[in-house]
Amino acid sequence: MINIGRNPFAASFATAIDSAATWNKLKDGGAMKIDGGCYCGRVTYTAEVDPHTVTICHCSECQTLSGSAFRTLAFADERTFALSGAPKSYIKTTESGGRRELYFCGECGTPICSSAVSDGPKAYSIRVGTIRQRADLPPLQQIWFRSAQAWVTELAALPTFQKDASSNFGEKAD
Ligand SMILES: [Zn+2]
Ligand SMILES: [Zn+2]
């Protein structure tokens, strides 16, 4: 499992975590069994993730590849990660010259995970939006913040609607 260290600010996130069970897992640094899959259900997986690894990535590649403002990730050791449904993959070269294989559903296009292209033991970076238990996996850090969209820190100030209100603009949201 990738060890990105304990987040020194984790204690201040306690109030954001509404489940005592989740908080106990965070405190203990224990692995959490998860499962998930793509939108159409063709690709599924099971894994164990360390809730301490849940990270928001604001890099420009994550913005493009997710089609959103940022991506949320959790890491799983390959020994605990079982993927089924034959996802498609795409290999990208990172800024540092490393190569990463990105897995996605060839049918509905949902991004599932990525891993380094190498012979060594792999860690899989799972896209948290595909994890069924994602409500229990709050992010504990934000990386590549230098390329974050300027408005991400202002979301709490926006008007909110409990259901779709995109018709305010004459469009359907999804
Ligand atoms: Zn799918
Ligand atoms: Zn990124």
Image (cartoon, rainbow, N blue to C red):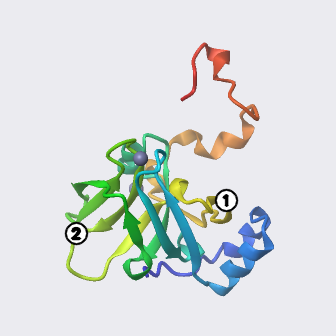
Distance between the Cα atoms at labels 1 and 2?
A: 30 Å
Q: Residue at x 66, y 73 (%)?
A: 9
Count the labels in the image.
2
| Quadrant occupied by the N terminus | bottom left
Q: Secondary structure at mark 2?
A: loop
Ligand 1 is within 8 Å of the C-beta of the residue at disc 1:
no
Q: Position of residue 38 (x, y in %)?
A: 46, 51
Q: Decide: is 15 above or below 62.
A: below
The three-letter code of the residue at mark 2 reads Val
Q: Which mark is residue 117?
A: 2
Q: Residue at x 68, y 80 (%)?
A: 25
Q: Position of residue 157 (x, y in %)?
A: 73, 38
Q: Position of residue 3 (x, y in %)?
A: 46, 82
The three-letter code of the residue at mark 1 reads Ala
Front-lying residue, 50 or 155: 50
Q: Decide: is 144 above or below 78.
A: above
Q: Which mark is residue 135?
A: 1
Front-lying residue, 78 or 165: 78
Q: Is residue 55 visible?
A: no
Within-10-Å neighbours for mark 2: few <14, some 14–19, many 20+ = some
Query: Where does ligand 2 appear, by image quarter?
Result: bottom left
Q: Position of residue 109 (x, y in %)?
A: 37, 43
Within-10-Å neighbours for mark 1: few <14, some 14–19, many 20+ = few
Q: Is residue 141 visible?
A: yes
| Residue 84, quarter of picture | bottom left
Q: Residue at x 57, y 17 (%)?
A: 171
Q: Which mark is residue 23?
A: none
